[in-house]
Image (spheres, rainbow, N blue to C red):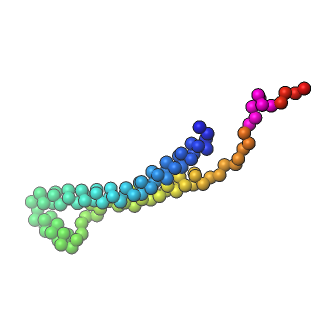
């Protein structure tokens, strides 16, 4: 395998992995946010503190939740875009064409 072929394989792999990461990150963030939200709600309901239960009721009524519950998808989206961009950059690099080296067997013999 030539070096150029290895770079092309790496470039296409980075493009595919980057796009998949950028697509999967929001899906994972939504799933993780729902899980954290459910765990937070269950923990607050199990408490016997009236103030905490009142705060949960108020937050649910307002449609808000604690900041630590929300998982941001942006790090994964930016990382996926960077990986795909680097892969595209590797694919776009042009290598100078070098003529093939002649073998000793094909060279004319001196007289």
Judge whether 49 appears above or below 10 on screen: below
Q: Can residue 68 be seen by looking at this rendering?
A: no
Q: Which residues are magenta?
A: 101-107
Q: Residue at x 15, y 69 (%)?
A: 57
x then y, percent, for residue 111: 90, 26
x then y, percent, for residue 71: 32, 59
**Residue 106 belongs to the span the image colors magenta:** yes
Left or right of residue 96: residue 89: left
Q: Residue at x 16, y 57 (%)?
A: 43
Left or right of residue 48: residue 26: right
Query: Residue 99: which quarter of the image?
Result: top right
Quadrant of the frame with the N terminus: top right
x then y, percent, for residue 37: 23, 60
Left or right of residue 66: residue 107: right
Magenta: main secondary structure equals: loop
Front residue of 103/62: it is: 103
x then y, percent, for residue 108: 83, 30
Number of numbered discs visible in the structure rendering: 0
Q: Residue at x 9, y 60 (%)?
A: 48
**Residue 44 belongs to the span the image colors magenta:** no
Judge whether 4 appears above or below 46 on screen: above
Q: Can residue 98 be seen by looking at this rendering?
A: yes
- Of all residues, the one furthest to the bottom in this rendering is 62
Left or right of residue 42: residue 36: right
Front residue of 97/79: it is: 97
């Amino acid at each position: 395998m030539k070096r150029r072929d290895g770079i092309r394989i790496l470039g296409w792999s980075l493009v595919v992995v980057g796009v998949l990461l950028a697509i999967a990150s929001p899906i994972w963030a939504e799933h993780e946010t729902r899980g954290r939200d459910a765990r937070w709600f269950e923990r607050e309901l199990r408490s016997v503190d009236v103030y905490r239960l009142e705060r949960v009721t108020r937050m649910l009524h307002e449609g808000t939740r604690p900041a630590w519950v929300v998982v941001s998808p942006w790090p994964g989206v930016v990382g996926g875009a960077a990986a795909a961009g680097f892969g595209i950059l590797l694919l776009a690099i042009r290598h100078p064409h070098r003529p093939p080296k002649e073998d000793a067997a094909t060279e004319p013999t001196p007289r």
